[in-house]
Amino acid sequence: MSWFSVPKKISDLKVALSRDEMLRVSRILIIDDERPDLIDDLKKARFFVDHLEDITPENIHELERTEYDVVILDFGNVGSKMGPDQGLTLMKHIKRIRPSVVVLAYTSKALETQHAEFFRLADGVLPKDAGIVDSTERIEEALKKAHSVENLWRGMLASAGIEPGSKQDNDWQDLFVRGLSSNRKMAKFKGFFESDIGKDISKQAALAIIGKLITLVGGSGA
Amino acid sequence: MSIALDFSPLPIVDLRSPSFPVEGFNVTVPAVCAKHYETGECLRHYQILPVEAAMNPEVPVLCPFGFTSIPFKVGPELLAITAVIPYPRMGGGQERQNAKRFAENKVSLLSAQRIIYGVKKAFTKLNEIADATVQRHSAALHEIRKLNAKIKQNAERLQQGGSNLRAAEVAEKTLAIFQASELMSKQFEVMEILANQNLAKLPPNTTIEPYKIFHKCMKVYEDTGAKTRVKLSATPGYYPRIQAFDKTFPIIATVLIQNAKKYAALSSEITIFVEPAGDQNCKVSVSNISEGQQLLDDSVMERGVRMSTDTDGSGNGLFVAQLVAKQHGTRIGVRSELINHLTVRNTFEVVFATVPGH
């Protein structure tokens, strides 16, 4: 065995999720004060879609507890009870607590300068007057991105407070990819990972993403 | 170049990209300054002014040729009144010479400060107007895009469903397309009048029955599973006709019904009533019940005023409806009654002169 070993990278992993599997495992949340008719079309097309009229301190647990892959987020008249900037307040919150969630900006409003960050932070835009076919295509693209290994790993790092490209990131990538080949190695990775994460509740989302990655890649260490 | 340069009575220069001063609309740049500018000294003077301004804002600074500049900040812009001879004087022989030759450019420091204040105010106001215009257009366009979504998506559903759709489903989707298209037309009509208010000054060209117009507009807002009901009634046997401009009159009906529906409490009823008001007038009132809203007064008819900020809207509808009411020799009035501490009944009323014999 060569004792010169090339570190493994997440980019070495290949994931092939069929459309049917992707629809089966994906969850979408639409946050809009007016229930869009599009929801019925998406459900007919076998997307799993939830709708909330708003996020408030009373129902925020629904967003934080459930593992949504894509959030389609309106700007106007949502998030007012969470902060002063309507949808932008929610956008920032989602990006903070669930960095791997793909968020589509669901508005056709031309926003004021101080709210333009809503578009900058979003992973894409879904215009309110997009047709059904167009909307479905954009949402599928968003789901593909949400389920990509790169997106999930990046989200996991953000949740764990680890800088991408850092030594810890590289070490974890190497351990994780090697861990997929055997239970013993995956246990080793999990041991290092949980010890680095510690008991910090704010970083527990990182653990959940690792679980998702293992399921996605289908490693024997699951 | 800053738009503030157009609002100064005195010569003025933009210090972020300095060049030869812009003429004031009261006081011009002395002809001799053109020669001075070619030396490059003036440009160097303007380039130093921001540093001076940072240390001593709005303090006069003598230029190399005996004139004075006063730098000031307005919003993100850095400007300077320039080519003036202030009093009290800054000092120096050149300044004295300039004062004899260019009396027009003599200005008191107090006046200069007042002018600076005026430029700042004009600039701020312009920006507010520009922002408000952008916002109103954005809000109006947003409404149209939502309606466009209904048209586009229902057309797609009809196309995808094809012959598999039941007749009732086809009828429902076709109606949704028609309604959205009609509402979009109404939006365009409001925007047309905003763009050209002369339309609301044209004289009546026909006679119409207000009841029929309100009935037609009401039908557009009917939808299945409606959260609010719209009920139209009239004094029995009363079918008055009025003089009207047929292109604009329906806007009154559209806007009053649309507003009533938008701000109505869930499961409440909107009532439209047509009744006599004296021997020669008819009154149309549109009422709704709303919750958690302030009592309304006539200010709600002013341009840009919103009844609430938690729904979409540009604040132009009622303003335009009032213009059309004036076109028809009347005005829209509003009354609010508190029913309980949360619930309000709002009534918009408009009285028209009827055509004799009806």
Image (cartoon, coloured by chain):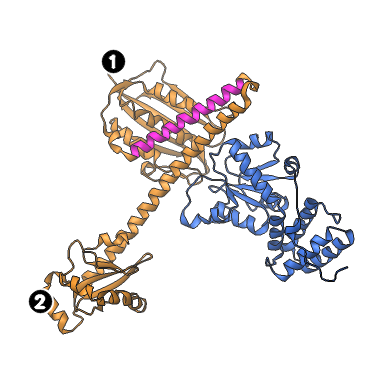
Chain colours: A blue, B orange
Side of A109 where B113 appears, left or right: left
Residue B281 forms part of the magenta stretch: no
Which chain contains the residue that carries disc 2?
B
**Region rendered in magenta:** B168-194
Total number of numbered labels? 2
Q: Which mark is residue B100?
A: 2
Look at the image and tell me in which quarter the C terminus of chain A lies. Answer: bottom right
Q: Residue at x 40, y 15 (%)?
A: B237
Q: CA distance from mark 2 to mark 1?
A: 80 Å
Q: State the image coordinates of residue A128 (x, y, percent, origin top left).
A: 54, 41
The one of A154 and A2 positioned closer to us in this rendering: A2
Q: Answer above or below: position of B215 versus B128.
A: above
What residue is shown with label 1?
Answer: B357
For the stretch drawn in magenta, the main secondary structure is helix
Amino acid type, callout 1: Gly
Classed neighbour count for the residue bearing mark 2: other residues with Cα under 10 Å, few (<14), some (14–19), many (≥20): few
Q: Quadrant of residue B250?
A: top left
Q: State the image coordinates of residue A160 (x, y, percent, origin top left).
A: 72, 64
Q: State the image coordinates of residue B175 (x, y, percent, origin top left).
A: 53, 25
Q: Answer above or below: position of B96 versus A164.
A: below
Classed neighbour count for the residue bearing mark 1: other residues with Cα under 10 Å, few (<14), some (14–19), many (≥20): few
Q: Quadrant of residue B165?
A: top right
